Image (cartoon, coloured by chain):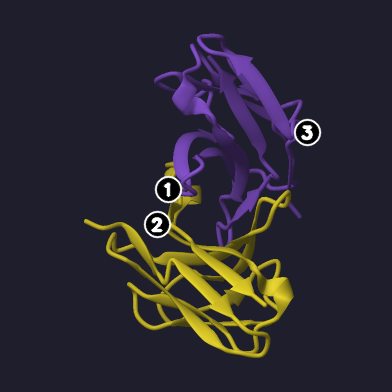
């Protein structure tokens, strides 16, 4: 049981290059999320997917696209990288239904991808 | 809109002492959950403790407890008998229990335990 996996762990891009960050979970969770973490700003939500086939914007979606390929996989794409997208990117997953169940349904995080755009 | 405020950017605590990390929140949702995560220098996010807005008792998990004061909208994390391994960033987060159930994070507190 690997939990949430992310690839790559590190990446350096030049301005204008594109790349896709991969994320997969093996916990059969419905919901998946992409965050970015910048110094002094905590984690900010980029996009999320409440279930297979659905995606929605979070707090900072500009410059990103996502694909929920199936229940397990949720990818984040940078079409034309900019230095402002230098950050650590985290993927997370969780079960849904916390409001009805009263349970924690905490989010499980991947190890992160450290991206530098020069 | 939801907001989490952590006013302590950094804290230094002597080993074996108790420490309280502050968290206040703002929401108009009637049902929500509050979380604390730990991020050690290795970078991973580790879930520590959860408090539901309708829970009658404060949550506890081993050395971690959550001092939940709903009227004051605060959800402080208390770590008892601190250890060197507790040195890390700590994030408070909130989730609405309606709609998309996404998390809103605070900016974090860097805790350093002094031997």
Local crowd at mark 1 within 10 Å, few (<14), some, or many (≥20)?
some
Q: Give percent across and percent down for residue B88.
A: 55, 35
| Chain appearing in yellow on the rendered image | A
Discs 3 and 1 lie in a common subunit: no
Locate residue A6 relative to residue A88 in the image: left or right: left
- Say which of A92 and A99 sits in front: A92
Q: Are marks 1 and 2 in contact (CB under 8 Å)?
A: yes
| Chain appearing in purple on the rendered image | B
Query: In this picture, is B36 found above or below A21?
Result: above
> Is residue B22 visible from the viewing direction of this image?
no
Q: Label 2's element?
A: loop
Question: CA separation, marks 3 and 1?
Answer: 27 Å
Q: Label 3's element?
A: loop
Mark 1 lies on residue: A105
Q: Are marks 3 and 2 in contact (CB under 8 Å)?
A: no
Mark 2 lies on residue: A95
Residue at image coords 49%, 49%: B43
Query: In this picture, is B28 found above or below A44?
Result: above
Residue at image coords 45%, 47%: A106
Question: CA separation, marks 3 and 2?
Answer: 30 Å
Local crowd at mark 3 within 10 Å, few (<14), some, or many (≥20)?
some
Question: CA separation, marks 1 and 2?
Answer: 6 Å
Quarter of the image with the N terminus of chain B in it: bottom right
The chain ID associated with circle 1 is A
Of all residues, the one furthest to the left in this rendering is A1
Q: Which mark is residue B7?
A: 3
Local crowd at mark 2 within 10 Å, few (<14), some, or many (≥20)?
some
């Amino acid at each position: 049981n690997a939990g949430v996996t992310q690839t790559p762990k590190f990446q350096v891009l030049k301005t204008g290059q594109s790349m896709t960050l991969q994320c997969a979970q093996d916990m059969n969770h419905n919901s998946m999320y992409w965050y970015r973490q910048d110094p002094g700003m905590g984690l900010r939500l980029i996009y999320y997917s409440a279930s297979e086939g659905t995606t929605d914007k979070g707090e900072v979606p500009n410059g990103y696209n996502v694909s929920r390929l199936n229940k397990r996989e949720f990818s984040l794409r940078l079409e034309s990288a900019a230095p402002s997208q230098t950050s650590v990117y985290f993927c997370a997953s969780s079960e849904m239904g916390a409001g009805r169940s009263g349970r924690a349904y905490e989010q499980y995080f991947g190890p992160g991808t450290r991206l530098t755009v020069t | 809109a939801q907001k989490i405020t952590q006013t302590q950017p950094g804290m230094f605590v002597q080993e074996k002492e108790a420490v309280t990390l502050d968290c206040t929140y703002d929401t108009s949702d009637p049902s929500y959950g509050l979380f604390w995560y730990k991020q050690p220098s290795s970078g991973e996010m580790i879930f520590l403790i959860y408090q539901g807005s309708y829970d009658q008792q404060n949550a506890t998990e081993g050395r971690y407890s959550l001092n939940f004061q709903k009227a004051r909208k605060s959800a402080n994390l208390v770590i008892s008998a601190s250890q060197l391994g507790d040195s890390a960033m700590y994030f408070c987060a909130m989730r609405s229990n309606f709609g998309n159930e996404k998390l809103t994070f605070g900016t974090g507190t860097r805790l350093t335990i002094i031997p």
